[in-house]
Image: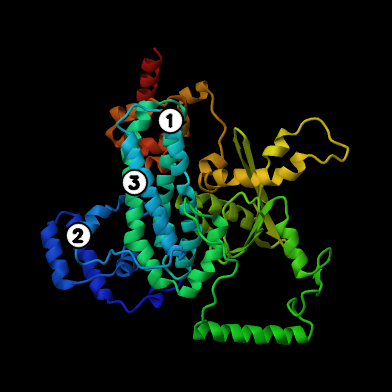
Amino acid sequence: MEDMRKHLPEVDMEKLKRVLDIKARYLAGQLSLSEAQAELRQQVKKIRPYELALAEQELKTFEEDECRKEDIQQMMLLFDGLLDTGRPELAPEHPIMCYYRENDEMRKWLKEVERLAPYPVIKNEWLGLYDELQKWRTHLSRKQNQLYSILERKGFDRPTTTMWLLDDFVRDEIRDARRLLEEDQDEAFIAEQKTIVADVLDLMQKEETVLYPTSLAMISPREFEEMKAGDREIGFAWITVGASEQPKASAPTQEEASATGFAGELAQLLGKYGFGGGSSPDQLLELATGQMTLEQVNLVYKHMPVDFSYVDEQEIVRFYTDTEHRVFPRSKNVIGRDVKNCHPRTSVHLVEEIIEKFRSGEQDSVDFWINKPGLFIYIYYVAVRDAEGRFRGVLEMMQDCTRIRSLEGSRTLLTWDKSNKEASKGQAEAAPAAAPEVAHEPEEICPEPTPSTSELLELGPETRLKALLEAYPWLKQALPEINPAFKMLSSPLARIMIPKATLAMMSERSGMPLEELRAAILQRITQHQG
């Protein structure tokens, strides 16, 4: 993995070790706030945001949910006067300033949440407000696909491995609250608003305190210019950003100039002797079943009615089709990225399982689908193998099949109507709302058969907690009465744990014998039904 330090000014690692030691003792209650601040002032004096990021990256043991657990306000108090938290002076359309601008807009909408929360719910008013809050998905999607990607290539993968989980947690809180509103659960909906405001503000402060300043320290002006095209592909929340077609030219570094010069000379030499496809735009490439120019190949892929992505045998993303109706948000920064880092930690196990089964030859394909009112998304994965049967990667195909599923009868005559012209446009308009859920909610992508009530009441070791809670939602509140260990089901980690938990796992984690747990749950169900 790339060394993050190569992309930062020189850093005193011994100083960072002292910072983490003082911080750990303070959080453990071994130092008071004033004692910890005094030690920091004496031993550290000043610390830059990117130094904190480097310390977390290289000197701290990985914890999957650490970003969610980190109390940003407590950290700000600890480093008060030592950490520069000022906003940088950047052009409005600089990629980092676009994130700041979106944060400013989000804060305005959160103030509106606080203004409305004390009053009786007027549903349409709240629905309009939540339409705005849900635009935050675009901010998160751009951050995950663009910013995390380039930082990861430079050795800073903490955003991918930890902050992504917090991004999705906040996104899902907003989504779930809207569902409560739509189902007229006004009391539960209002009760969620304070938490949502606090969690969104917490996420934004974590972005602005460490993520964005570190990005500015690690990413060159040239790279930021190159990011702009991908940012525009994914889009922005609330703000308007100019759509200049070409990034501004900036002088390449000596290393880049050297590499470019060599590559250019090599391409010219190969072209001179008839090798490669870059010597002429009209040169035909020999394909397996035909000949096309490179331009024609790109045009065909751009007009594909389905989306394709290709991951090679080294698990690196090599290609995706740049179609207007794209189901998932994509940008060019995904190319060259480890496919596991293109997914949140909660769904990486699915990616790993698919690749493992394909690589071993145990499986050759697998499909998933999302079926919601007014939307049907189909996803298909197939193992790519060469003529000798060797595994060469994975091809992913995605399609919005909503219109196809709605077709009835037969059409055998040529008919030009609005549906022909508007079908792809309609898919493109539907995609932004669907894409984040398809991309980040494996429990919806891979639905398990819904067990019957009689099967649930058998309560075997493999009975799923998720199935129980879907059949008996009130059980979530009753489980801590059975065993205090189940209080964790009300914590942020519940969203990750519930889909995976079985009765056997619950027994093991709580220390409660399986039969005793089974009997206690059945007793609660019987009492509730009686």
Q: Residues within 10 Å of mark 2 (few under 14, many from 20)?
A: many
Question: Of callouts 1 and 3, which one flags the residue occurring earlier in the amino acid sequence?
Answer: 1
Which amino acid lies under the numbered mark 3 shown in the image of this protein? Answer: Asp
Q: Is residue 331 left or right of residue 153?
A: right
- Residue drawn at (49%, 51%) of the image: 138
Which amino acid lies under the numbered mark 1 shown in the image of this protein? Answer: Leu
* Disc 1 versus disc 3: nearer the observer: 1
* Residue 511 visible in the picture: no
- Return the x and y of residue 192 as percentages of the image width and height: 35, 35
For label 3, the residue is 199
Which amino acid lies under the numbered mark 2 shown in the image of this protein? Answer: Leu
Q: State how far apart marks 1 and 2 are (Cα).
A: 39 Å
Q: Is residue 14 left or right of residue 124?
A: left
Q: Vertically, is 385 above or below 505?
A: below
Q: Secondary structure at mark 2?
A: helix
- Residue drawn at (55%, 56%) of the image: 234
* Residue 131 visible in the picture: yes
Q: State how far apart marks 3 and 2 are (Cα).
A: 20 Å
- Residue drawn at (64%, 47%) of the image: 428
For label 2, the residue is 78
**Depth check, front residue: 344 or 213:** 213
Q: State how far apart marks 1 and 3 are (Cα).
A: 19 Å
- Return the x and y of residue 473 as percentages of the image width and height: 41, 26
Question: Of callouts 1 and 2, which one flags the residue occurring earlier in the amino acid sequence?
Answer: 2
Question: Of callouts 3 and 2, which one flags the residue occurring earlier in the amino acid sequence?
Answer: 2
- Return the x and y of residue 257 as percentages of the image width and height: 55, 85
For label 1, the residue is 181
Q: Is residue 235 left or right of residue 309?
A: left
